[in-house]
Image: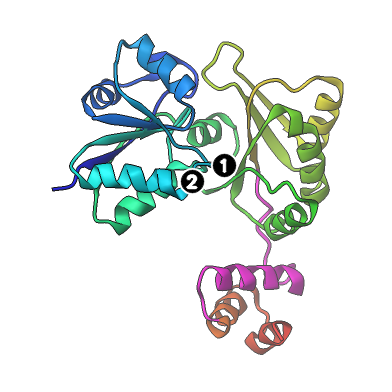
Amino acid sequence: MSGTLYVIGTPIGNLGDVTLRQLDTLSEVDFICAEDTRVTLKLLNHFDIKKPLVSFHEHSPAADARKIIDRLLAGESCGVVTDAGMPCISDPGEVLVKLCSENDIDIRVVPGPSAVVSAVAVSGLSTRRFTFEGFLPVPKKERSERLGNLRGETAVMVFYEAPHKLRSTLSDLAEAFGGDRRIALCRELTKIHEEVLRLTLAEAVEYYNNNEPRGEFVLVIEGARESSGAEMTIEQAMEQVNKLIEMGEKPTDACKAVAKETGFRKSELYSQLR
């Protein structure tokens, strides 16, 4: 009988946010897979937990994942953690969950803090709908394409960013979405220097041109204003069509759905795909 993979959330900064169930599970599993064993060892030592640690990160070879799966198939239990927050969200742990799913290994979640949800909650922006975009692509062409696809997104958007890339990212966001778009810059959440700045993108660019970015950032940006069909351009309508197609819709069905919402003719939209 195979073992169980436990997806274990850990504090995003303040160790006081750890839960009893997280500590119990970390104490009971046979071994722990960590993104950075040095970071996880500090957490374990703080709570006097002694468990074998296995390194598993984005550069780990497939053979390392196979070894972990083999141990689970042999009946051992494993806890997977990331450096902070919930593993498997923009995190290499998702590889292990996928492999466990493919091998019929039991997977259970031990939830914990999430930088994404925490940032949205304190952003002061609409929390009705949001989309998590993680880190933007680094290559200029890919980044431009991603931002172009998001230009008409009406849900709040959430991005991660490192301090040394923040200035260029803010400039790219302002260029793509316009300087008037509101943004909440959430820095070092739950830590001593926690800070949330609520500005426009233009104000954020100016602020960080004059102030050195420090710490890890979660950027929460308001979505585009809802527009009626009469105000929507054919380009914006086609963005919606392409999004539906990317999600698996047939081109004819995607055109039909967007035509119903925007007032454009289905044939008019479909002709743009050719």
Q: Is residue 231 magenta?
A: yes
Residue 9 sits in quarter: top left
Q: In the image, is residue 257 above or below residue 144?
A: below
Residue 198 appears left or right of 71: right
Q: Which residues are magenta?
A: 222-250
Circle 1: residue type: Ser
Q: Residue 126, which numbered label?
A: 1
Camera-nearest label, 2 or 1: 2
Q: Is residue 233 visible?
A: no
Q: Is residue 168 visible?
A: yes
Is disc 2 surrounded by few (<14), some (14 to 19) or many (20+) residues within 10 Å? few
Task: Locate residue 148, reporting x and y percent.
Answer: 74, 58
Q: How is the image coloured?
A: rainbow
Query: Foreground residue, 94 or 145?
Result: 94
Q: Is residue 39 magenta?
A: no
Circle 2: residue type: Pro
